[in-house]
Amino acid sequence: MVSCFPSTPKKLAMTIACFLGGASLFGFGLHLSYVHVAPQQARIKARNDFVRERLRKKHGK
């Protein structure tokens, strides 16, 4: 069985740097996702309300 652990301190530092870089990109994407959730939900609610009101007017309910 071959070990995949970095054999030198430089390789270990590069592995840690790549991991932290990926984790920071993931965290930034997660942050952007949470920031844009409320406006998207408000837009969907407004569209649903518009469609419901239009259907009520059209069908007289």
Image: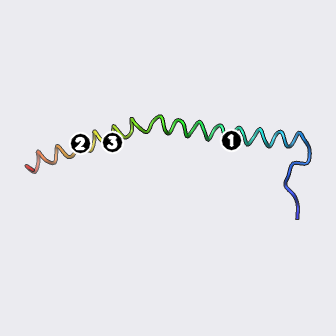
Sort mark 1 into few (<14), some (14-19) or many (20+) by Cα contacts within 10 Å: few
| Secondary element type, mark 2 | helix
Earlier sequence position, callout 2 versus callout 3:
3
Q: Amino acid at mark 1?
A: Gly
Q: Which residue is denoted by mark 3 in the rendering? A: 44
Q: Amino acid at mark 3?
A: Ile
Q: Quadrant of residue 21?
A: top right
Percent position of residue 22, x then y: 68, 41
Sort mark 3 into few (<14), some (14-19) or many (20+) by Cα contacts within 10 Å: few
- How many numbered marks does the figure carry? 3
Closest to the observer, 31 or 59? 31
Vertical relation: 42 (above or below) 58? above
Q: CA distance from mark 2 to mark 3?
A: 9 Å
Q: Amino acid at mark 2?
A: Asp
Percent position of residue 26, x then y: 62, 41
Earlier sequence position, callout 3 versus callout 1:
1
| Secondary element type, mark 3 | helix
| Color encoding of the figure | rainbow
Q: Which residue is denoted by mark 2 in the rendering? A: 49
- Residue extending furthest toward the right: 8
Horizontally, is 52 left or right of 59 in the view? right
If the image is split into quadrants, where does the N terminus sit?
bottom right
Q: Which residue is denoted by mark 1 in the rendering? A: 22
Q: CA distance from mark 3 to mark 1?
A: 32 Å
Answer whether labels 2 and 3 touch (C-beta < 8 Å). no
Percent position of residue 24, x then y: 65, 37
Q: Quadrant of residue 51?
A: top left
Horizontally, is 12 left or right of 39 in the view? right
